Image (cartoon, rainbow, N blue to C red):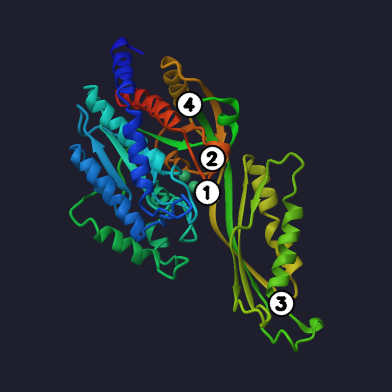
Amino acid sequence: MESGFIEAARAAAAAVDEGRLWQSLMDLAAVGARSDGGVCRHALSDEDIAARALLIGWAEARGLEVSVDEVANLFIRRRGRQPDAAPVLVGSHLDSQPAGGKFDGAYGVLAGLEVLIALDEAGVETQRPIDIVAWTNEEGGRFDRSCTGSSVWAGASELESYLGDIGADGVALGEALAKTLAATPDLARRPRRWPAHAFIEPHIEQGPVLETGNIPVAAVTGIQGVRWMNVEVAGKAGHAGTTPMAERHDALQAALRAIGELNTLMSDPHDRVRFTVGRVNVTPNSPNTIPEKVMFSIDFRHPDEAVLEDRGGRIAEAVKTAAAPCRTLITPTLTMDPTTFPEAMVAIIEANASGLGIGCIRLASGAFHDALYAARVCPTAMIFIPCRNGLSHHPDEWAEPRHCAEGARVLAATLAQLADTS
Ligand code: HGY
Ligand code: MN
Ligand code: MN
């Protein structure tokens, strides 16, 4: 790296302000705050709209240019010397799990903002623009599918295919999207497709490795594959007191048999398979009516595509056999293959951490992120920071202020470098 860059990268990293970054994280966490210290900020909800308004206010106060696209992905631009050059993107998501934490998603967006402010304060001018992005509906906690904004932006799916998704609150995604866009009528609109030079997603690890090893930062090498699906089990309602057990088609008992069979299918002595049934809906959900219908979710993950294909391909038959004579219907809702980030991108993060004297290891991600889709469009990688006990998707999710700042310093140097490469 030429010396001029090194000075710029160091200056940008040095200008990262731990207290300012922490305050922005705490201010954002107040939007959708839960009484137990967590956050509930569903995608395209009033809380999401309020979080966007807070971020837009901060950005505009710094003279940054804010825009939005048709799927409500929010962009905040810091201009470069070449205004029309493909930008370097940095960001994550503002939406949270229903009982989520202060840092999942929020850290990636706000570390990006802190770096743009630090670049200004350090007087660093970059060739390329740098765009912060807050992707719409990464979590999928409200609507059945996740990574809506990044998958549409990457061309992996069409916006129209999401509009009819009905949220857990009965509201269609299209309606919630229209309401969110209507809340920022004056924002410039981005077209559906445009070139990007690179994307970096800063995120808490959501696992124990960095904290256990007392390591401040990870250069993330890739993300394991994911298979989400919804299973519907159809039985026959009836009176709990009068219907003989031998004559019942109890959808919940059938679902329990199916889940038991799936636990056997997904058993793994090496503990690398991740299999979760996180949502179960029972209809009519009355204590004295035999369940007529059950919907349960499947979240199946593994780093090896062959395992995903093999075991994922056996789910339908296992469910059908175990639930009989109840009928079953399986609907895939998310299919992401394992992704490896380009070596050059991972190496840039490592080199900048080393240049700043910040410890860094390479680590694969067990959680999925919008970076999975961005990687289809441009060279992509992630920066992880530790989180307490590896806990996430939980109100007690926590990251230390110094780790947030160290991750942002590595991000500052990395973005300064990427925004100056042709
Ligand atoms: O589920 C995930 O892996 C991500 O945290 N939304
Ligand atoms: Mn996340
Ligand atoms: Mn998450």
Number of numbered discs = 4
Quarter residue 241 falls in: bottom right
Up the image or down, 381 lies above or below 137; here it is: above
Q: State which tag comes first along the sequence, 4 or 3.
A: 3
Q: What amino acid type is highlighted by mark number 1? A: His
The label on residue 346 is 4
The mark lying in front, picked from 3 and 2, is: 2
Identify the residue shown where x is 37% and y is 42%.
26
Between 228 and 412, the one lying in front of the other is 412
The label on residue 206 is 2
Question: Could you tell whether 147 is left or right of 252 in the image?
Answer: left
Identify the residue shown where x is 27% and y is 58%.
181
Q: Picture coordinates of residue 17 (x, y %)?
A: 32, 28
| Mark 4 burial class by Cα count in 10 Å: few <14, some 14-19, many 20+ | many
Kindly indicate whether the residue at mark 1 contacts the one at mark 3 (C-beta within 8 angstroms). no
Q: State which tag comes first along the sequence, 3 or 2.
A: 2
